Image: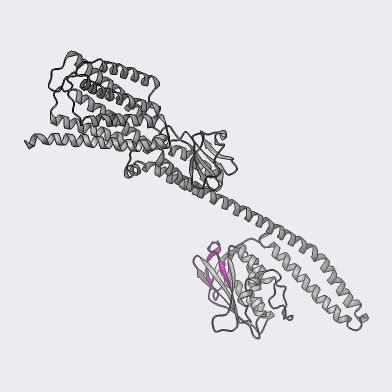
């Protein structure tokens, strides 16, 4: 007794599963319809609502005995079944997946079948003989259902072409589900006396078709992620293009077409805060008026014109949803928010880049103007000071005996200050030339040049000890600028030392570049004044009037080093040592051609 009951149990389980799937989809569609009413959601709700009613009625077995109630119940049930393929066809029509004449043909066919059903006598029960009229009726019913289902399936499958992967696959699943449900009806109507096992198989086929239909609306996250792989690859490519954009216009050009393609949208646009259209595909500027300025950053709103607009920190990303958005819009809105975040970051980076470029250009213009003014003033002052010195010389030679009292002292002080001014003007001129008019570079041995400069400085400061030890880089550099750099550094170290100066010049590697170190045993520079020492006219020993200089040596060194792409800093004495200063110069690898021992003969190398 238990064996025959097993297929019946399976039949009820399969029918219950079908009903559960339908109820789940109905709940989802009701929620979706509350959010956005559209013909598509209405017809989809009709498809699953009617299927749910038919499946629920299957749990109430009624034998058509010809009575008004029981025959009427069967007629209503069959009419509901006839509505399913027509509702599916109208659903496809609402998505423009089938042509209007196809929908009209489906309406005529369904109406004819409904009329035939209403006019039918008692339906034969399983095992009873079928009359000719009923055989013809079942044949027309199956053909009508199949034609409408095939038309809907074909339209839905074709409509998915050119759409994003998720939408495309959803449409294809809908089409496949429509065909499976049609096949289920054909198999159900083909046998007059189906066995219980055949009923189970038929029910399982129907359940599979309903599951396919349901997947289009209740899509699991893992399946959506799998389908979206190709779209995400395109999204990643778009993000890389956004990272290389340097202007809002380039951001718009890189993002708007990709957004339109990614969402299968009818149009997309990027609008700045002023309402100006940066780029658009399929949208006109007149359609973008009335964006809600009160929306928060990251909010996605639906405008009165039916556009999806995501608020950015500096504008809007706007999308005109495609015909499938009423059904598949929620996940797409989340993706739109993600894309908008990348677009917003790219826009902010571009604005920062433009602001930095503007500031840099303004600073460079101001520096150029200052250098030009410095050169002009220095050049114009040189002739008057030469005249002053000339007249002072004439005055000292031809009228020296006429000076009385402290006149000679005053004349000497005027001469000293005039010579100082001449040196100062010459240093200013030299400072203004660095970076503007550079001598030709050549391969030079920095160690050999340092030895030559050390000998010249030692002749001026015989009490000093100047050593040039170890290996030094061979640089592709201007010999004039290198000599100016070494002369200023070594002479500064010698003349600012107390007593017998000890100056040491060394070099060492630093990655692909080099470090040049000039150390002395002088008074040292307090840490608070080390940066200030590189400013023009700054003399930290101004009280020591016996030390000559204009305060331009270190600024000239800084300009030479930075023009070559290097760095220069001042360091104090090592711990436990009261005196001493080290000038530390970092030279880039681009100008280092090799290394040469300063103790070996000079060999100039070609670059």
x, y percentage for residue 346? 51, 49
Is residue 599 rendered magenta in the image? yes
Is residue 306 rendered magenta in the image? no
For the residue pair 474 and 546, the one nearer the viewer reads as 546
Say if 518 sits above or below 40 in the image.
Answer: below
**Which residue is rendered at x = 32% and y = 42% of the image?**
220
x, y percentage for residue 23? 29, 36
For the residue pair 380 and 326, the one nearer the viewer reads as 326
**Which residue is rendered at x = 17% and y = 32% of the image?**
200
Say if 182 sits above or below 18 in the image.
Answer: above
For the residue pair 504 and 68, the one nearer the viewer reads as 68
Say if 206 sits above or below 447 in the image.
Answer: above
x, y percentage for residue 307? 49, 36
**Which residue is rendered at x = 44% and y = 45% of the image?**
237
The residues colored magenta run 584-607
Furthest residue in direction bottom, as rendered: 499
Task: Report whether 441 appears left or right of 536.
Answer: left
x, y percentage for residue 544? 72, 81
Furthest residue in direction right, as rendered: 402
Q: Quadrant of residue 575?
A: bottom right
Furthest residue in direction left, as rendered: 1
For the image shown, how many numbered marks are present on the structure?
Answer: 0
Q: Quadrant of residue 233?
A: top left
Colour scheme of the picture:
one colour
Task: Report whether 120 appears left or right of 405.
Answer: left
Q: Say which quadrant the C terminus sits in.
A: bottom right
**Which residue is rendered at x = 91% and y = 77% of the image?**
398
């Amino acid at each position: 007794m238990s064996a025959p009951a097993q297929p019946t149990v399976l039949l009820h389980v399969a029918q219950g599963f079908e009903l559960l799937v339908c109820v789940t989809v109905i709940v989802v569609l009701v929620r979706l319809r509350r959010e956005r009413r559209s013909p598509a959601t209405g017809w989809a709700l009709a498809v699953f609502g009617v299927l749910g009613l038919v499946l629920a009625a299957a749990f109430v077995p009624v034998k058509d005995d010809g009575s008004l109630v029981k025959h009427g119940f069967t007629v209503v049930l069959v009419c509901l079944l006839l509505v399913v393929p027509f509702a599916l066809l109208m659903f496809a029509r609402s998505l423009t997946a089938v042509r209007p004449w196809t929908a009209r043909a489906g309406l005529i066919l369904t109406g004819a079948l409904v009329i035939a059903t209403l006019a039918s006598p008692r339906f034969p029960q399983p095992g009873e003989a079928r009359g000719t009229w009923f055989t013809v009726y079942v044949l027309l019913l199956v053909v009508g259902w199949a034609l409408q289902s095939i038309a809907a399936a074909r339209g839905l499958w074709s409509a998915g072409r050119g759409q994003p992967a998720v939408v495309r696959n959803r449409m294809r699943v809908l089409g496949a589900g429509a065909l499976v449900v049609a096949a289920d009806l054909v198999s159900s109507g083909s046998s007059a006396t189906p066995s219980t096992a055949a009923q189970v198989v038929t029910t399982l086929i129907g359940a599979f078709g309903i599951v396919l239909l349901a997947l289009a609306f209740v899509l699991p996250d893992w399946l959506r992620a799998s389908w979206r792989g190709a779209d995400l690859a395109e999204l990643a490519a778009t993000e890389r293009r956004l990272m290389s954009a340097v202007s809002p216009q380039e951001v718009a050009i890189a993002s708007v077409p990709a957004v339109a393609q990614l969402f299968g949208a009818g149009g997309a646009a990027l609008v700045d805060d002023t309402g100006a259209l940066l780029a658009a595909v399929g949208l006109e500027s007149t359609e973008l008026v009335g964006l809600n300025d009160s929306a928060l950053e990251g909010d996605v709103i639906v405008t009165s014109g039916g556009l999806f607009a995501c608020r950015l920190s500096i504008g809007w990303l706007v999308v005109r949803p495609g015909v499938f958005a009423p059904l598949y819009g929620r996940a797409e809105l989340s993706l739109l928010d993600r894309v908008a975040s990348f677009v917003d970051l790219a826009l902010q980076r571009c604005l920062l880049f433009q602001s930095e470029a503007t500031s840099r250009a303004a600073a460079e213009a101001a520096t150029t103007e200052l250098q030009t003014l410095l050169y002009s003033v220095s050049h114009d002052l040189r002739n008057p000071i030469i005249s002053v010195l000339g007249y002072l010389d004439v005055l000292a030679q031809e009228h020296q005996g006429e000076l009385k009292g402290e006149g000679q002292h005053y004349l000497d002080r005027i001469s000293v200050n005039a010579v100082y001014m001449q040196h100062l003007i010459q240093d200013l001129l030299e400072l203004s030339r660095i970076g503007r008019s550079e001598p030709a570079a050549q391969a030079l041995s920095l160690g050999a040049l340092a030895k030559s400069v050390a000998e010249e400085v030692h002749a001026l400061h015989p009490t000093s000890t100047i050593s040039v030890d170890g290996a030094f880089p061979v640089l592709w550099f201007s010999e004039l600028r290198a000599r100016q750099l070494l002369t200023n550094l070594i002479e500064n170290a010698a003349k600012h030392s107390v007593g017998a100066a000890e100056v040491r010049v060394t070099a060492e590697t630093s990655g692909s570049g080099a470090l040049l170190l000039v150390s002395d045993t002088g008074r040292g520079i307090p840490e608070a004044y080390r940066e200030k020492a590189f400013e023009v006219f700054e003399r930290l020993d101004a009280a020591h009037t016996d030390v000559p200089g204009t305060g331009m040596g270190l600024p000239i060194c800084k300009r030479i080093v930075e023009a070559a792409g290097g760095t220069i800093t001042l360091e104090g004495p090592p711990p436990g040592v009261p005196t001493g200063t080290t000038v530390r110069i970092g030279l880039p690898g681009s100008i280092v051609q090799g290394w040469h021992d300063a103790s070996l003969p000079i060999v100039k190398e070609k670059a």
